[in-house]
Image (tube, helix red, strand yellow):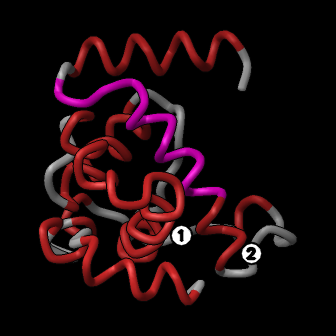
Amino acid sequence: MDEQFLKDIEELAEVDGRYAKAAYLFIYDALQFTVEKLGKESLPKQERHVSGRELVQALSEYGVDQFGPLTLSVFEHWGVRETRDFGEIVFNLVGANLMSKTDNDCIDDFADVYNFDEEFEWKKRRAKFKRGA
């Protein structure tokens, strides 16, 4: 990521004030993870679109891969407490011309996709994580 991009993210996070800069950067990394997971990385850029729901589902997997049992704590530290918060970050990025969307995308695509306490309960996730699922 170039220096100007990082400055833009930092300014956006500061102006909005709800979410940490790290949360914005995590969204970018998770988007790339999602594109790869869905097998879209070889498609032309305009065909790599990922829906809000697809991104939120992948954010769960990517978060657990990155942070393991600390996922929920990390998200809470960043100010992310529900799936809609991911959408708020994405739409902040769209509003700042740092990410794009289609006419069909809306903030409600990110609402109530899963409950954080249930999704990131480590006792439940640990078995899947150990199996490599």
Residue 98 on the magenta segment: no
Image x and y of residue 115, in percent: 13, 72
Work out which residue is located at the far right of the displayed protein and give it: 42
The amino acid type found where label 1 is placed reads Val
Left or right relative to 33: residue 65:
left
Query: Quick one: SS at disc 1?
Result: loop
Q: Secondary structure at mark 2?
A: loop
Q: Identify the residue position indicated by label 2 in the image.
A: 40
Q: Residue at x 37, y 65 (%)?
A: 105
Q: Position of residue 128 (x, y in %)?
A: 45, 87
What residue do we see at 40% from left, 87% from top? 127
Residue nearer the viewer, 2 or 96 = 2
Magenta residues, dominant SS class? helix
Q: Which mark is residue 50?
A: 1
Which of the 4 image quarters holds residue 55? bottom left
Residue at 52 percent of width and 63 percent of height: 65
Which residue is at a point 47% across and 21% down the rendered structure image?
Answer: 9
Q: CA distance from mark 1 to mark 2?
A: 9 Å
In the rendered view, does 50 fall on the left or right side of 107?
right
Q: Are marks 1 and 2 in contact (CB under 8 Å)?
A: yes
Residue 19 is situated, as x and y percent measured from the top left of the image, at 25, 30
Say which quadrant the N terminus sits in.
Answer: top right
Q: Is residue 24 magenta?
A: yes
Q: Mark 2: few, some, or many residues within 10 Å (few <14, many ≥20)?
A: some
| 5 versus 73 height, above or below | above
The relative height of residue 127 versus residue 60 in the rendered view (above or below) is below
**Vertical relation: 107 (above or below) 92:** below
Quadrant of the rendering where the C terminus is positioned: bottom right
Q: What's drawn in magenta, residue-wise?
A: 18-32
